[in-house]
Amino acid sequence: MAGRFRLTRPGTAWFAGSLLLAAGSLLAWWLPVYWLDRLDWQPALAISQPWRWWTAAFVHWSAGHLAANLGAAVVVGAFGLAGRVPRACALAWLVAWPLTHGLLWLQPALLHYGGLSGVLHAGVAVVLVFLLARGERRQRVIAAMVTAGLLVKLWLEAPWGEPLRHSAGWDIALAPIGHATGALAGALCALVMLAAGARAVAPVAAP
């Protein structure tokens, strides 16, 4: 039974990565509240305290915020698992993680940022680019539809507007720019991955 989840199998390294993101978020949730200010993304401190490029993903401002992102992490993990993405995609996602937060400098008015959603958008973008470029015909069709939906979602969120928005059903202010920077970082890292190892990153047929 254990052999069925070897990390060498397509998609399993990706799913393991999503579980690690969720585990890190759960661990950070139980830290004393004052630690949040030491872990979240703050552009003024990002150079002198570089760990924030990674730890910002683990910071959640409310239980609802955490629960939503934990559920999304499982969905993104399942998306890559179903797409049978290779380990190279997991590596591209890893690189996109800090880049997602670094690109937040595009919105200098955003003084604090935390949460998994930006990195999860990066993961979705990595899978979509891979499937569009290397997937089977059915996978490319599905990826094209999901890509269209993602682009519409990002457009409607208007990330170029106010840095923080209050939305019905949320007990925290949302920062749509994080979704956009995540999608951009994931797409860029996936394209670099494909360009750097076009022969090594081959399509994986479904069983």
Image (tube, rainbow, N blue to C red):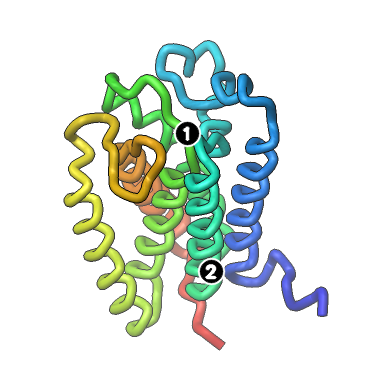
Helix, strand or loop at mark 2:
helix
**Residue that appears at 41% across and 18% down:** 43
Residue at mark 1 to residue at mark 2: CA–CA distance:
23 Å
Count numbered badges in the picture: 2
Can residue 200 be spotted in the picture? no
Specify whether 109 is left or right of 19: left
Residue 61, position as x, y percentages in the image:
50, 35
Residue 18, position as x, y percentages in the image:
58, 55
**Disc 1 residue type?**
Gly
Residue under label 2, please give it.
Answer: 78
Can residue 22 be spotted in the picture? yes
Q: Up-down: is 17 above or below 77?
A: above
Where residue 100 sits, quadrant-wise, is top left
The residue nearer to you, when weighing 126 against 62, is: 62
Q: Residue furthest bottom?
A: 207
**Residue that appears at 61% across and 20% down:** 34
**Residue that appears at 79% across and 76% down:** 3
Specify whether 119 is left or right of 167: right
**Disc 2 residue type?**
Ala
Question: Between disc 1 and disc 2, whose residue precedes?
Answer: 2
Helix, strand or loop at mark 1:
loop
Using the image, tell me which numbered label, if any, was put on residue 114.
Answer: 1
Residue 169, position as x, y percentages in the image:
35, 50
